[in-house]
Image: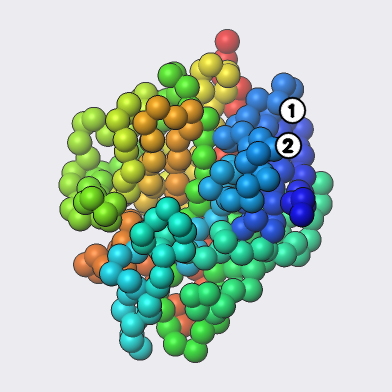
Amino acid sequence: MPTTLLTLRDSLTQLTFAPELGASLVNWVRLSDGQPLLRHSNEQALAAANPRRLACYPLLPWSNRIGSGGFTTPDGWQALSANTEHEALPIHGSAWQQPWQIVNATSDSASLELQSQSPFPYHATLHVQLTDGHLRLTLQATHLGEQPTWYGLGLHPYLPRTAHTRVQAQASGVWLCGEDKLSRQWVELPQAWNFSEPTLLPQQLVDNAFTQWPGRARIIQPDAGYQLVCEAQGSNVFLLFCPEAQNFFCFEPVTHPVNAHHLAGRPGLQLLAAEQSAQMSFSLHYQALAD
């Protein structure tokens, strides 16, 4: 069955997204020439109906991987199972794997919602707004279960990468991972991963959580003559995923590091009782570079 797409447009850009595919963004392009501002999703990617092949999707009620088959809550053990065929651990929560409903939509904005029972009851909303090349995503989760549990949020944008793509984002430290891709040790930021000034992306694999991020970043695409100025609210961690020899990378604003459920103090997670909510937002502002 063909996927239903919703299209928003402002004076500079156009956005398509697929509510029924985990509220995934499909394509965000510059109107003047169709230049992709997020990773381009072709017909084959859309037909696969897999958000991991599209442009961006929401992460909740947690981001990235959780080890040990679940986590402890104040009222006992919350068991979790692997939710993909290619990962041994549960990853990215459950919202991206469920159809969302359209609450309302205009030519340049839309609100979506999800009523989920997995892995515990929650209600999620995603508001999308386009204004003069400014894409803003606001994500909220409200716990509906009788017993309190831990929540984390994030967004997973895929971005075009060329040999000249640069990123600028401050951080004070980074979590190093083991073979299982789970956070093991926090270290002060190594110089090789210092993006405080516009910096080319590493050629080697990076898949790590960077901490004490002030919530501002720039993604500079000189080949295509633009930059994205990014701002996050409710997030002081970003995950940087740079796979080797690929034409994309991911810059993910999140509320917590990988496997925070099993780290001392559960950094960045929120314990929500019934009807309590967590929220974060992320904006990407398209700006043409001066000639």
**Disc 1 marks which amino acid?**
Leu
Position of residue 18 measured from the top left corner of the image (x, y, whole percent): 69, 51
Asked whether residue 103 is in view, the answer is yes
Which picture quadrant has residue 149? bottom left
Residue in front for this viewpoint, 16 or 270: 16
Position of residue 153 measured from the top left corner of the image (x, y, whole percent): 47, 61
Residue drawn at the location 42% of the way across and 53% of the way down: 86
Asked whether residue 153 is in view, the answer is no
Would residue 223 be found to the left or right of residue 90 on screen? right
Q: Residue furthest front?
A: 85
Q: Earlier in the sequence, mark 1 or mark 2?
A: 2
Residue in front for this viewpoint, 235 or 155: 155
Residue at numbered disc 1: 31
Q: Quadrant of the N terminus?
A: bottom right
Residue in front for this viewpoint, 185 or 282: 185
Residue in front for this viewpoint, 76 or 13: 76
**Disc 2 marks which amino acid?**
Gln
Q: Which mark is residue 14?
A: 2
**For the residue labelled by badge 1, is the local secondary structure a helix, a strand or a loop?**
loop
Q: How is the image coloured?
A: rainbow
Q: Residues within 10 Å of mark 2 (few under 14, many from 20)?
A: many
Mark 1 → mark 2, Cα distance in angstroms: 6 Å
Would residue 253 be found to the left or right of residue 290 on screen? left
Position of residue 132 measured from the top left corner of the image (x, y, whole percent): 70, 35
Position of residue 122 measured from the top left corner of the image (x, y, whole percent): 56, 76
Residue drawn at the location 39% of the way across and 47% of the way down: 238
